[in-house]
Amino acid sequence: MNTTPDAASLWLDQAAAAARAAAAALAAAPAATRDAALRAAAAALRAARAEILAANARDLAGFDAAGGTAAFRDRLALDEKRVEAMARGLEEIAALPDPLGRVLAEWTRPNGLRIRRVAQPLGVIGMIYESRPTVGADAAGICLKAGSAVLLRGGSESFLSARAINAALGAGLRAAGLPEAAVQIPPATDRAYVGALLGAAGKIDLLVPRGGKGLVRRVMSEARVPVLAHAEGLCHTYIHAAADPAMARHILANAKMRRTGICGATETLLIDSAIAPTLLPLLVADLRALGCDFRADARARAIVADLPAAEPGDFDTEWLDARLSVAVVDGVAAALAHIRAHGSEHTEAIITEDAAAAQQFLDGLSSAVGMWNASTQFCDGGEFGFGAEIGIATGRVHARGPIGPEQLTTFRYQVFGTGQVRP
């Protein structure tokens, strides 16, 4: 039976009210209590491994029956290593410094007033995400560490997995004496719950979309609450004329093919015209051996004749699959111009032994993350030392790049006087 918009709104009202009360409890709780909840949740995930994998198997069976892609299936699938990684991520988040109560700045005015800017929780977070069930555990862990409650609406294809994971998170909260309402999911998969979250002005404080272009566009256009933008991951790797060829081959293979369905995967190769005639055939051979397909511009096809021609829009496409767009460019300025024209301001990398060229590239980017001699797949909260991430923010407001506990806080001011009055 489908959930009506009215029924979804009723659930949202009740869930948000409970989350608001839970957020107040989290904000008042000592860091040690929040950390204890995270460690207990990690233990509960391990204890519930069999139940979580069984739920995921049922999700995968439904996905296979619907005929999804291999890359999308990889995003959905869990195994013992991924369950363990979820648990370890929660423990790593628990081990981070407390992001709350940090004095961000402090100064004294000529009249003697001392002003302090202090980090504080955001409150109630809403998150809408697709396919990857691990995202729910990561987001919950970061929100709890940052003193915020979270309402999680995952993709319908991963609902059973999400429900099993949420039960373990609730067990961790109970063990630490914190309210289970700090982490909630809707009771069903209906899209009406997405609409309820989008219209939750005054009930949630921040909405985080994490998924494909269609989801993010809908959230950005329809949301009545502030949105922490997470655009598509149309990431580029630029191989400069001064690149070490062996390094370039090694990095590109990882950046494209390690996991093709994640937002940090390289989707476009830009190769400098000075080295393209000798290096591009080797790169193509490497990636073809790994099962990669291509879409190439005319200059690249003049070097490797059997590359499929790029069609209009290919360089604007996040493939999320074993396909790579290829373009030949003339220097750093041309690479930056291509990225500005086609990128999503997520993550870009340059491979070069020329430090000045690398700095020119990094300084010229408007993207959230720029890398030098490293795979774009390092754009990840865990790899940045955040334990996990709630997403990769590509907007210009609040925070950018991987969002960990510290980035998921706001601030307030504390003013200390000695009897001053304003003239």
Image (spheres, rainbow, N blue to C red):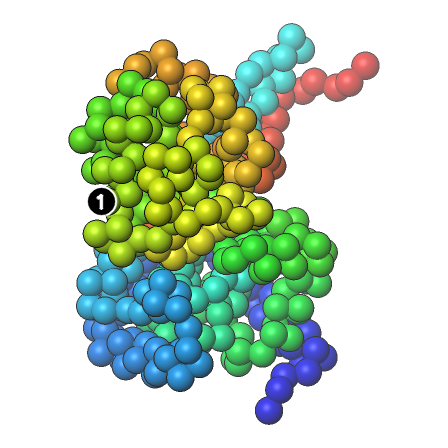
Quadrant in the rendering for residue 340: top right
Q: Is residue 37 visible?
A: yes
Depicted 46 relative to depicted 401: above or below = below
Q: Which of 23 and 75 is in front in this view?
A: 75
- x, y percent for residue 245: 22, 28
Specify the farthest residue to the bottom.
1
Q: Nearer the viewer, residue 63 or 408?
A: 63
Q: Which of 100 and 256 is in front in this view?
A: 256
Specify the farthest residue to the top.
110
Q: Quadrant of the N terminus?
A: bottom right
Depicted 328 relative to depicted 180: above or below = above
Q: Which residue is drawn at 60% across and 31% down?
A: 413
Q: Is residue 172 visible?
A: no
- x, y percent for residue 179: 45, 66
Q: In this view, does 394 lie to the left or right of 376?
A: right
Depicted 15 relative to depicted 22: above or below = below
Crowd band around label 1 with a 10 angstrom C-alpha radius: few (<14), some (14–19), many (20+): some
Type of amino acid under label 1 = Asp
Residue underneath mark 1: 286
Q: Which residue is drawn at 72% across and 79% down?
A: 6
Q: In this view, does 185 lie to the left or right of 81?
A: right
- x, y percent for residue 288: 26, 51
* SS category of the residue bearing label 1: helix
Q: Which of 290 and 95 is in front in this view?
A: 290
Q: Residue at x 22, y 78 (%)?
A: 50
- x, y percent for residue 143: 45, 53
